Every structure is written in C-alpha cells, then in structure tokens.
Image: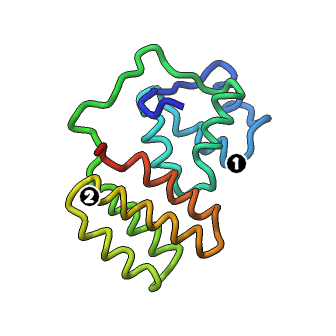
Amino acid sequence: MDLNAIYRKTQKGLEEMAHRTALGMRERTLLVMVDGKTTAAELLARARHMPDPPGLLAKLIDGGFIEASASAAPPPVAAQPSVKEAVAFARSYLTDNLGPNADQLVMSLEKCKTAAELRSRVEQARQILKSMGNPRKADEFWAGVEPLLPPG
C-alpha cells in the first residue's frame, strides 16, 4: 500500500455509504474518512484508535470500495511528519495502554532530538509492547506511529 496515495470512494463505496449493507462498523467508519484529499498515511493516523487500521484500509481497497485517485502525489515538504507529532501519538498511545508504566518509556521518547533516534526508541517501545504479551497492541501502536515518523 502506497502511504502517499490519495484514495476516493468508488461507485461501490458510495452505494455502501447510502445503503450500509456490506461493511462492518469499523470499515464503514474508515470509509467515511475517505474524501479524495487525504493520503493513506493520514487515514491510518486518523484511524489509529481502531484495531488494525492497515487491515481495514486494505479491506476497503480489496473490496473495491475505494481506489487511489490518479492525482496521488507525495505530500508537500511542509506536511512531512515531525518528531513532535510522532512523540505526541506515542505518548498518548502508550499512556492510554500502559498507564503509569509508560512514564519512563514516554520520557525517553520525549528526549529524542533526531528522526533516527526517535525511530530507534519507537521500535524499542514496540518490542516492549510485544514482550508484555500483547502483539496486537504492538502492531496497533506501530500502525499508528510509523506513518508519523519522519524519514531518517
């Protein structure tokens, strides 16, 4: 999946919006977010509260409910993710899911100054979530934070 692709609803997607016959609540919620202006990365970031946002988006694509528009282009340089945005998401997610146990991990993320340092710490956080016996939470965390990580 191209994270820079801009998706739009197909005729089938528009019919699903009108009649609500084929999709579950989560898929339909993501379908509502598809507006022909938002990149896949932004859709995934907006859906980070849902389980398996990449899987939900793939289901919409594979089911023919949405398609990449011909005008898909990389976001402008000013819209590139920043360390600050990625840290904000990670802080929120980790605090919501680990409570006070997230404090040390969040502090280490907030000290990151470079994209490379942040990426390394975020990958460590992902491994910590996995080691706590919840690989689904680790995957959900990664799906939400990875599109927000700046290149580097």
Q: Residues within 10 Å of mark 2 (few under 14, many from 20)?
A: some
In percent of the image, x 48 and y 41: which residue is there?
A: 43
Along the viewing direction, whichever of 125 and 96 lies nearer the viewer: 125
Q: CA distance from mark 1 to mark 2?
A: 31 Å
Residue 6, horizontal then vertical, whole percent: 45, 27
Q: Is residue 91 above or below residue 55?
A: below
Residue 119 position in % (x across, y down): 35, 56
Q: Amino acid under label 1?
A: Met
Q: Quadrant of residue 131?
A: bottom right
Q: Earlier in the sequence, mark 1 or mark 2?
A: 1
136 to the left or right of 49:
right
Q: Which residue was labeled with disc 2?
A: 84
Residue drawn at the location 62% of the way across and 20% of the way down:
10
At a point 54% along the width and 31% down the height, the residue shown is 1
- Residue farthest to the right, as pictured: 21
- The quadrant of the rendering that contains the C terminus is top left
Q: Amino acid at mark 2?
A: Lys
How many marks do you count on the picture?
A: 2
The answer to whether residue 137 is left or right of residue 109 is right
Mark 1 closeness class: few <14, some 14–19, many ≥20 residues within 10 Å: few
- Is the Cβ of the residue at disc 1 closer than 8 Å to that at disc 2? no
Question: Residue 25 bears which disc, if any?
Answer: 1
Question: In the picture shown, does residue 21 fall above or below 29?
Answer: above
Q: Secondary structure at mark 1?
A: helix
Q: Nearer the viewer, mark 1 or mark 2?
A: 2
- 142 up-or-down from 13: above or below: below
